Amino acid sequence: MKKRIISLLIAVLLLLTACQGKQDYLSGTPTGDAALDESVEALLTEVCEGSDTPLLPVYDWLLTELKYRAAPGEGVEEFTDEITISLAAEALSKRRCDCDGEAALTAVLLRRMGYDAEIVRGQFLRGEGGEWVDHAWVRATVDGVVCHFDPLYDAHFTAGDTVSCFMASDGDMAATHRWQ
Amino acid sequence: MKRIIVLVLIFTLAAALFACGGSTKLTASDLALQIGGFTATPETTMDDVRAALGEADEYAEAVSCVYTGMDKTFTYDNMIVYTYPDGETDRLMEIYCDGGDAVTAKGITFGASVEEIEAAYGSGYTKSGTLLTYELPVSAENMEPASLYFELENDRVTAIGITAEHRAE
């Protein structure tokens, strides 16, 4: 009897440990697209494994792995679930996308990690005294705080190895971006 | 003494051969892609494309998120050409083919396996997502490299692309 109880306790402990590991970065909702969800889970597992701050390696991955390429045809009018899934899947598979694709993939990754994330349509300022350019990025709630993620901007416009649009507050973001 | 010199020579030669093993030094002409009798390389310009293939079936442009000016896409049958603005000039960024008779300078075409690609171009590629990419060295730090890439599905080539060396920002 004693042996059975100990075995049961060990099994429960193992189960809890396994669940705990997953909760760190896979506690959110999948998109419902089986192929994309599988790729997203594989990517998050690869990138976040062993990290205490999984948002950072995910952002770093988006910064370094995605290459900019304009999308042929008309731009996205509205980020419906279907369009977001399609753009995210293409960006993840082909590693090439414009700001719409990068925002869609960022949103899908953050949602899968358990954060409320929405794609923001707005503009960013290209260079000091430069022009405002139509753009898309992501605003999410992390630990109760609303913040912005724009890996495409950081990849191309932030100097050196620094980032300015990783978990940026509304105030910090407003220096280079504007949105409704 | 003679024996030591011979051993050192053998070791050096073996080390050099080991370092070179599996990778092939690629040049821009290795990255060429033949499409409908037209040969595109990372040095091809949009004027070259127009002269060989005529006007595109579809054309789209939008203010670039990265470069100052308009990103332009020219869609042909089975092929998309991407350009980016560089001052007054539209520079070729990428040619992407997902059908037709496209074949690379080393004979790789649709349906080729990863083994066939490796036999032709060596193992000096990077694999990310569904892409297997060979890159040339960049001429400056702020440039994206010229490259030849293969899009794979079930380890078979379903699309082929070349990118020209272009500014990263």
Image (spheres, grey):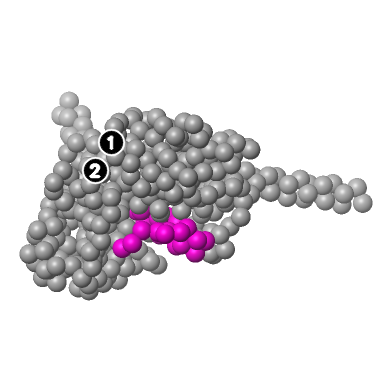
Amino acid carrying label 2: it is Thr
Q: Amino acid at mark 1?
A: Gly
Magenta span includes A95? yes
Q: Residue at x 25, y 61 (%)?
A: B60
Image position of B8 with respect to A21: above or below: above
Q: Residue A113: horizontal and vertical position, in percent? A: 58, 47
Identify which residue is drawn at 42% across, 40% down. A178
- Label 2: few (<14), some (14–19) or many (≥20) C-alpha neighbours in 10 Å: some
Chain at numbered mark 2:
B
Q: Name the residue nearer the viewer: A87 or B62.
A: B62
Indicate the secondary structure of the residue bearing disc 2.
Answer: loop
Identify the residue at image location x=36%, y=48%.
A134
Per the model, the C-alpha gap separating discs 2 and 1 is 10 Å
Residue on which disc 1 sits: A130
Residue that extends furthest to the top in the rendered view of this protein: B1
Q: Which residue is mark 2?
A: B68
Q: Is residue A45 left or right of residue A159?
A: right
Q: Which residues are magenta?
A: A73-97
The image position of residue A39, as x and y in percent, is 49, 57
Which chain is indicated by disc 1? A
Q: Secondary structure at mark 1?
A: loop
Task: Tell which residue pokes out farthest to the left in this image.
Answer: B51
Contact, mark 2 vs mark 1 (Cβ under 8 Å) = yes
Q: Residues within 10 Å of mark 1 (few under 14, many from 20)?
A: few
Q: Is residue A26 left or right of residue A139?
A: right
